[in-house]
Amino acid sequence: MTLALDPTAQDLLFREARTANTFTDEPVTDEQVQAIYDLVKYGPTAFNQSPLRVVLVRSAEARERLVGHMAEGNQAKTASAPLVAILAADNEFHEELPALFPHFPQAKDMFFAERPAREQAAGLNAALQAAYFIVGIRAAGLAAGPMSGFDFAGVQKEFLDDDHTPLMVVNIGKPGEDAAFPRSPRLAYDEVITTV
């Protein structure tokens, strides 16, 4: 069986795409980020809750503050990437549900009145959206370098608030020289997929 998506696009999004550790100095424009968002906003989330929030770190001052919260091995690449995005889950996403899920506005209070339920749903669904965001970066012909090696509490305090939980930091740009490590193995189909 073949997939509906053209093999060249499959390569761009998956087979040839790699996590980048170095980048060229070519800027990533607001127009490129807008195009990425305009594509990936259609990725599904439960109740269409769409809890992902993105902070673009562009200024030198903000970049320096962020680098201070990164693990040592992530500092240099975060300092030099053309664009860095902080991806976070909005734990108050339910306030938007009447507009985002208009055919069942009661979902806001029926399922998400309690903060622990919101935090669990926001974490899962924002992580889904973060994956879409990375694929969208690849669709724009750019490379992503997602990282979880940072001081989560520090990034939250510095760039977010108590209602937003950081998920990852993503370096974005055109891959530079020796940008990727050798391809790591993947699990085989029968190691992942079972039928009952």
Image: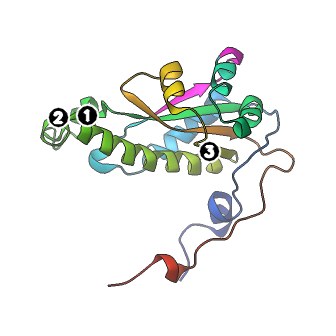
Residue 57 lies in the magenta stretch: yes
Residue 1 on the magenta segment? no
Q: Which mark is residue 146?
A: 3
Q: Is residue 49 visible?
A: no
Residue drawn at x 63%, y 62% as measured from the top left: 14
List the residue tagged with mark 1: 94
Quote the CA–CA distance across marks 2 and 3.
Answer: 32 Å
Q: Are circles 2 and 1 on residues that touch, CB within 8 Å?
A: yes
Q: Position of residue 24 (x, y in %)?
A: 82, 38
Judging by the rendered image, the residue that carries numbered circle 2 is: 113
Instruction: Judge from the rendering whether residue 155 lies leftward or rightward of residue 179; answer left or right.
Output: left
Label 1: which secondary element: helix
- The image quadrant where one finds the C terminus is bottom left
The residue at 72%/33% (across/down) is 75
Which of disc 3 and disc 2 is earlier in sequence?
2
At label 3, counting other C-alpha atoms closer than 10 Å, the crowd grade (few under 14, some 14-19, many 20 or more) is many
CB of mark 2 within 8 Å of CB of mark 3? no
Q: Amino acid at mark 1?
A: His
